[in-house]
Image (tube, coloured by chain):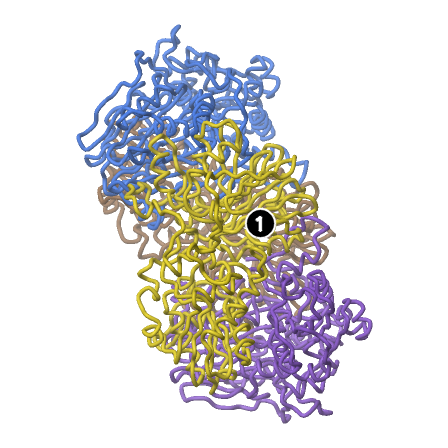
Chain colours: A blue, B brown, C purple, D yellow
Amino acid sequence: MDTADRFNDECGVFGVFRNPGASALTALGLHALQHRGQEAAGIVACDRGKFRLERHMGLVDDNFTSQDVIDRLKGDCAIGHNRYSTTGEPALHNVQPLFAETAIGGFAVAHNGNITNARKLRETLRNSGSIFQSSSDTEVLIHLLATSTKATFIERFVDAIRQLEGAFALVALTDNLMVGCRDALGIRPLVIGDFEGSFVLASETCALDIIGARFVREVEPGEMVVISDRGMESVRPFPDRPSNRFCIFEYVYFARPDSTISGLSVYEVRKRIGRELAMEAPADADIVVPVPDSGTPAAIGYAEGAGLPFELGIIRNHYVGRTFIEPSDQIRHMGVKLKHNANRSVLKGKRVVLVDDSIVRGTTSMKIVEMVRDAGAAEVHMRIASPPTTDSCFYGVDTPEKSKLIASRMSVEELTRYIRVDSLAYLSIDGLYRAAGQDSRHDVPQYCDACFTGEYPTTLTDRTDRLPQDHLAFLEKA
Amino acid sequence: MDTADRFNDECGVFGVFRNPGASALTALGLHALQHRGQEAAGIVACDRGKFRLERHMGLVDDNFTSQDVIDRLKGDCAIGHNRYSTTGEPALHNVQPLFAETAIGGFAVAHNGNITNARKLRETLRNSGSIFQSSSDTEVLIHLLATSTKATFIERFVDAIRQLEGAFALVALTDNLMVGCRDALGIRPLVIGDFEGSFVLASETCALDIIGARFVREVEPGEMVVISDRGMESVRPFPDRPSNRFCIFEYVYFARPDSTISGLSVYEVRKRIGRELAMEAPADADIVVPVPDSGTPAAIGYAEGAGLPFELGIIRNHYVGRTFIEPSDQIRHMGVKLKHNANRSVLKGKRVVLVDDSIVRGTTSMKIVEMVRDAGAAEVHMRIASPPTTDSCFYGVDTPEKSKLIASRMSVEELTRYIRVDSLAYLSIDGLYRAAGQDSRHDVPQYCDACFTGEYPTTLTDRTDRLPQDHLAFLEKA
Amino acid sequence: MDTADRFNDECGVFGVFRNPGASALTALGLHALQHRGQEAAGIVACDRGKFRLERHMGLVDDNFTSQDVIDRLKGDCAIGHNRYSTTGEPALHNVQPLFAETAIGGFAVAHNGNITNARKLRETLRNSGSIFQSSSDTEVLIHLLATSTKATFIERFVDAIRQLEGAFALVALTDNLMVGCRDALGIRPLVIGDFEGSFVLASETCALDIIGARFVREVEPGEMVVISDRGMESVRPFPDRPSNRFCIFEYVYFARPDSTISGLSVYEVRKRIGRELAMEAPADADIVVPVPDSGTPAAIGYAEGAGLPFELGIIRNHYVGRTFIEPSDQIRHMGVKLKHNANRSVLKGKRVVLVDDSIVRGTTSMKIVEMVRDAGAAEVHMRIASPPTTDSCFYGVDTPEKSKLIASRMSVEELTRYIRVDSLAYLSIDGLYRAAGQDSRHDVPQYCDACFTGEYPTTLTDRTDRLPQDHLAFLEKA
Amino acid sequence: MDTADRFNDECGVFGVFRNPGASALTALGLHALQHRGQEAAGIVACDRGKFRLERHMGLVDDNFTSQDVIDRLKGDCAIGHNRYSTTGEPALHNVQPLFAETAIGGFAVAHNGNITNARKLRETLRNSGSIFQSSSDTEVLIHLLATSTKATFIERFVDAIRQLEGAFALVALTDNLMVGCRDALGIRPLVIGDFEGSFVLASETCALDIIGARFVREVEPGEMVVISDRGMESVRPFPDRPSNRFCIFEYVYFARPDSTISGLSVYEVRKRIGRELAMEAPADADIVVPVPDSGTPAAIGYAEGAGLPFELGIIRNHYVGRTFIEPSDQIRHMGVKLKHNANRSVLKGKRVVLVDDSIVRGTTSMKIVEMVRDAGAAEVHMRIASPPTTDSCFYGVDTPEKSKLIASRMSVEELTRYIRVDSLAYLSIDGLYRAAGQDSRHDVPQYCDACFTGEYPTTLTDRTDRLPQDHLAFLEKA
């Protein structure tokens, strides 16, 4: 499969405060956020001071739909997490939410993002006696909170997150508070909703839609919202004035097209990307074909912009699980074909504009192009709905190392030859900013676009410091 | 979920003769045919006279991808089957291929379709001492073959299938033959391919594509192809001249859009259906929105025909498994929302043409319409890519009883009010025939369209005869 | 483990007619008969004409104790079976009871024993069209019954079992009858009990004890008891006058010591065996030590007979499951030590009489002797509670081939040296018959003692006839 | 089952230092110690600084016998643990060995016993920021060690265990040390062995026997042995002079009869207990019958002392798992009969001395006596191989609360009537001390006999202090 040839989704978080159906609502919210992480899921519920926790490898639907599980997770507050492993091995120990019993009570947290000084903080905490039970970067947060000398949860929380560097959209739960918090640059998303008078937190608005919650507003960059029986209060834990550097790749690929971020419909942004691309890089072609499903909205936009027919020239098989045994060396494009098949009748003899969201390692693109050509396409013009991805993400997205990113090693010309297309064009960075509602990219960029530019908006302590290795090779499988 | 509100897929069959990778190729073929049945899958391989059989509940990818399984299924011939339960409970006993040790050797068979006199035949066979181990209609075939007094497999096979009534596309395997056979009306599909010189049989051409096999031709209605080391021979087991009554619903919904049937691309037929529909039932609207994924090609066709923009106004969640616990009576359209979400920014204020393939019970349509309205659509014009489905299928498709089919109980006007749309239109039967390459529907129809017309092309013995009940309430779960 | 070095237990059968707790009682009965077979267990219950069947690999306690399972097995009649594989691979297909839907209704059967012309009958049945679904010898019975042309179950049953050769204690169930039947020689045991007015059938009396059923009598050799709502009737299906050739090894090893067979307490017979052995083969020794647990009653008898102290010189570990990885070639008696440990303080410096029930391959005996010597025993005198086992059993006991039976290859003198004991003595065949309540072995023996004498009381058709091989290498694992 | 009516086994520990088969040897050692805990087992291995950990619910044989598991546990040092839950729920989180990554490296520990100030220490540690991941009392040890400010492992270990109160036999592992340690009173056992030049630690000598290790000596009360590449050193961490208060119940019931403790064979002590009991409490009877298996050695001793025959009057079923559904209220002694059956032929008409190790709640004894009477015993004289168990154990044994201990509520006379025996006698406390090698019990007792006397040799802080409750109701099941 080509998950190795994608920027993979990261994590989804969700929370409900004071609603009798808290756990079932959280399961639904996580279902709607499943695209953000399919490796594992967890829910913690709080029932008058008692916490219950369930964490499972696998999909939400496979683990959180039975009456039994929901009954066990009793209580009127709950938070949940979908995980795609960004740090830590795929072991149950790393599945969130994490929970800690502290001197001032129980505390659970779910995290989307990545803490870029986690290993440094871990080292310091360990030296003063903290014992880590996972390889998750998130665990430093609960140790910082547990060892804080402050009197209240909010003070301790503020104390803890001020020490964190990197990207974090957090949902936390104590026995009488739910907290939502974004890092000072607001790299990862977090929205506030209202379900029948109960506050809801979610990574994306599509998770509000599934339960019919009303969208209230986004948690702002550098804001901490504290939800209690008194209502919602806004706290600003960070001394510096926060600026907004939201991850622009959420618009390109991560977020669901039916979500709205910062007032912009993700679907509309993707269609605009397609239109920008049609203007920047037109092609003398017969049809526009998306690489499904992620390339589809941009392809519709491109087709509209270019005045060309939009066609499903590649059919996606949605029943894709594990890798198959290869029965013969003769089978061409084996990996790609498990997921995609060329729609021969559409492609035959046509000059095709192929629209994909990005090129990571290039191997998948190469195979798709070859498959399209084998199906009889006369010409293949590849159009990419984002600039070249030249740099790794350290903010909670699973990306290959820079050296494995083909756009960091090859020019567009080289890549045109490598993937064997008649023409190849990427969207310009300014085009992307325009599609995302800006006039152009400013000197101090309005988004985090490090994967396209290498300009990381935070320091990256764990990348620069040398830190000792762990002694436990792996924690046991459950 | 709305699988209860669909005509569900039936079964897929696949076979490879004399190729060292027979089992792995069969696993790939079944993967490509997964849309035809997700309940269970099985493969039997033959290695110099020894048969090995693996049958599992669940998806092909979950059970037939490990080296272990493929290694156990050794041999250079293999046949496989994907099952969606049409008859028989979802027990391992009913999973195909079935195998029988007979007086003249081992025999395995995989069946797509439904034998409409199976219970009658079963009764007769039981009375003469045959012991049935499953509730599958297919099991009668192996008992007929085992009790036949003919000398050779082919004679026995002919002897057996002549007694069968209904729909059957069969792939069978002995220690030196692979057989493909379609009923006299060719209701269910079966194609012949060539993979590196080895014969391949498959329900659809998309299963040839995945392994890169060349399409040779279709098995003809009433034809039996016998593949041996001498090559392929064609046998005509049925005395009457067969006529072609291929299932027209395969074009509408069952088949994969990238498959080609009788020289017609399924995708193109669906687009033509959309165009016919735009002509027959235009709408004064702003956008055309498919109910994904099955309505998508027809919606593209409609949009083209009507000159309206095609928009993804409903987003599908592909991670849909089991039913969730309902947390609140307030959650509207709960079932539908697990799979679909309205793309608010697209729909808001728009007059929407909604294109779906069919309406079965009507409950899903009603909820989708309401969801689209809740998202702000100004008007909703439902267009159905087939005529009203008024009658059950007895040829291997899982359909509700006639009384549960809403189109058998309501006129289009009543249904328009029931599902609360501004207008509702179905494709005419002649329009469907035109889209499927005919001038119009003839007096002796060119397809089986019983689900639209109630004209069943075969007798339905088990529907008319009263037959005794079984004594085993259920066979144990494995 | 040393299961390979034992005559392994065979099967246990149980049945209850007309009692509201039929399935739960059957589960308890099978629990008490667990020593007769640990590979798999099954129960079929009948509820007013409807049969339900559950069959599972593993122990009764692991599969038949939950409320769910017992609830599913509803009905007031039930039969059950514990299996130790004597024929057929360890697959679910071979687990009993077997069930057949026949022209005259449903029929279930559980079998202890082995049909020595099963393959011959199978061949004949297959040639006339019967399809076999298992490799179990018992399946021939249901096909014979299904293909019988007789009018009633009892007539068909008689028709069927008259064709069977070998050993069989059967419990069968129809919708209004329970049948118990023993072969004409009564090789395997079957007893009748009365639980609160309901008839019970069981392999041994210990299964009556667990539910508190009263022992009524044994089913006689060649007798068929037919239990219906009219009560119990006795049928004599075999034309020849039956003689009693009950398996004498049941007294030596198979039966539980708390069971009573033919009026003799198994425990008392084993103690008498020990006393006979003490008379026949005294030893100048300090203590008598059993190889636990099977040698214990005979050791108590020997100690009493010889006037020597009885000591637990070998301690058994009851938590024995799978074979371990051997960490070092230095570990002596690895296999034996998983189950047994020498009790050093007891053995040190002592002249030890070691009492075991039998010697099969000799390897275990050799290791136990060495372990006892390593623990400091001054002398080891092995006394075996049966004559030399020189011949295989074909009547439902899992024994090695004759060539693997060490007593068929070595004299007592050779074996004394081989297992390195100071002396070795077996019980004489007449001594065994005396312990089992006879004056001596007669010319026409009173028991089946084929494993000691090679005198098989039936013909062994499948041993002598050449029969074709099956084509299915294995049926899939569930 | 009657596990609720026993003093249940506690835990077993094992370790090997510098042997290529360390993990496989540890698996074997744990197999031999399986009687000390059947709920879960774990092994941690260390391979040149890298630790690997496997912990599983269930038996050693079910989880630690595959090549895969042993291969994963690579390294030449390993420690292991069998758990019977004394504190903490039966969750994987509580399974040992525990592991901590500390400032000075990795550290694993396995514990037999119970820390009687664990909750107090936990509260203190939590207040200074330690996060607990289990409900196990043992986890305080790793936090004490991690937060110690001392420079070396040994200093930190000493620092930590000096704060512990209660009973502990510990085996710990760092990347270059294995440590064995017993509390100052040596309540729980720990022995040192030598396997082919590698040091071994084990709870009992039977675990040395299985691998053929030579017994070196016991770890002394209050001693810490530090095993490194330089050999073994002895450290005395406790300032006070330790006295020996070994648990006398290990002789009565816990230890395996083939183990040797403090130079005394457990089997011989049990036989001497029987002989003391025969002297103290003779009975005018015909036979001596043990309640198997734990009463067997004492019964042999009693029979010898009394000059009466020893008989297996109760037969034990070793295939005992879960509780069965009760099919009828009529079934007498249902629970007891799953495990035990009266051997009618032995008991009928006899005056029986019944020997059991102890009476806990009395319910099992009552049912066994009734079962023996039902089998026809003329008289039943119960003899108990220990004094009345009047007090709970807080040193690592799973005992009911004092109020549930029947001997704390009833006199011997009352109990005689309650369990319906003709006579009842316990062994005197001095008799027990004599059997265990002493002249009598001294004023400062030579053993811990708190369960018989209520004299606890340590303070019991967690019993006296009020401590806050945890907030996590349960950690998820794996």
Tell me if residue A26 can be seen: yes
Residue C459: give x, y in percent of width and height.
Answer: 71, 82
Q: Check the picture and name the quadrant holding the N terminus of chain A.
A: top right
Q: Residue at horizontal 37%, vertical 19%?
A: A163
Viewer-closest of B395 and C384 = C384
Number of numbered discs visible in the structure rendering:
1
Q: Secondary structure at mark 1?
A: strand
Rendered position, C92 above or below A282: below
**On the image, which quarter does residue A58 sit in?**
top left
Q: Chain of mark 1?
A: D
* Relative vertical location of residue C7 with respect to residue B268 in this rendering, above or below: below
How packed mark 1 is, by other alpha carbons closer than 10 Å (few <14, some 14-19, many 20 or more), is many
> Which is more toward the observer, A374 or D138?
D138
| Figure quadrant of residue A168 | top left
* Residue bearing the label numbered 1: D218
Q: Image height check: is B81 above or below C409?
A: above
- In this rendering, does residue B278 appear at all? no
Q: Position of residue D80 (x, y in %)?
A: 55, 46
Instruction: Answer left or right for B276 relative to D29.
Output: left
- At 56% across and 88% down in the image, what residue appears? C220
Compared across the picture, whether D150 is left or right of C183 comes to left
- A304 and A265: which is toward the camera: A265
Residue that extends furthest to the left in the rendered view of this protein? A230
Q: Amino acid at mark 1?
A: Glu
Which residue is at the front of the view, C236 or A19?
A: A19
Give residue D247's position: percent from left, percent from top. 47, 55
On the image, the x and y values in percent for residue B13 come to 56, 50
**Res A280 → quadrant:** top left
